[in-house]
Image (spheres, rainbow, N blue to C red):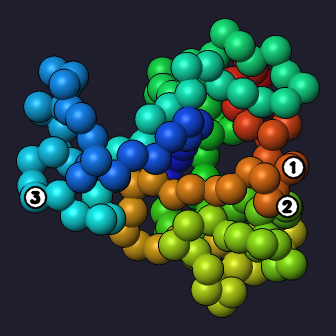
Amino acid sequence: MHVLFGWLQVAERIPVSSWAADDQWALYHPHFARQPHPSNVIYDSEKCLHLPGCASNQIAGAGTFQLYSPKLQLTDPESLRPGRWLLPEWFNPEHRASTLSFHGDASRWETGKGGVFLSSVSRGQEFVLNCDDYPEAISWLYRLFTPA
């Protein structure tokens, strides 16, 4: 089963090649263990999560969910394949300026009963959704942080 395990709201994208790594944590970070490359970047999070219209200033800008909840589940509950996701209908990238990263192939998306189905790419641990292009995401995200 695929589930959301955490979040990070990006404050800054920093190429490793331009990082002044004075912080001790950087010595142990895998992105600093190899030669600098233009695609090798660090994403720094916001200090507090910013969700317009929500009193979210008490939620860290990055973190992990401590317990499983069905609202964190991406896998379609009716599917035997973990990579077949059932998402809210607004996730459908048709007529949007962007799509969920690594999922630009329109054949991966199928509108169906209860939402939109996505055949997720088989490899990846983090995917990015530009919420500026998906304003519906804000209320959906806020519900992830509220009790069921």
In the image, taking residue 23 as reference, residue 60 lies left or right, namely: right
Pointers 1 and 2 in contact (C-beta within 8 Å)? yes
Picture residue at 85% right of the left edge, 22% below the top: 54
Marks 1 and 2 sit apart, C-alpha to C-alpha, by 7 Å
Left or right position of 73 against 14: right
From the image, tell me which residue sits under label 1: 136
Q: How much space separates mark 3 and mark 1, taking CA atoms?
A: 40 Å
- The location of residue 67, given as percent across then percent down, is 51, 23
Dot in front, 3 or 1: 3
* Location of residue 82 in the rendering, given as x and y in whole percent from the top left corner: 49, 63
Residue 67 visible from this viewpoint = no
Residue sitting at x 78%, y 53%: 132
As drawn, 66 above or below 125 = above
How far across and how far down the image is residue 6, in percent? 50, 35
What label does residue 90 carry, if any?
A: 2
Callout 2: helix, strand or loop?
Answer: helix
Secondary structure beneath disc 3?
loop
Three-letter amino acid code at the position of disc 2: Trp
Q: Residues within 10 Å of mark 2 (few under 14, many from 20)?
A: few
Q: Amino acid at mark 1?
A: Glu
- Number of other residues with Cα within 10 Å of mark 3, as a class: few under 14, some 14 to 19, many 20 or more: few
Circle number at residue 35: 3
Judge from the rendering whether residue 134 lies leftward or rightward of residue 58; answer left or right.
Answer: right
Determine which quarter of the picture holds residue 79. bottom right
Type of the residue with mark 3: Gln
49 relative to 88, above or below: above
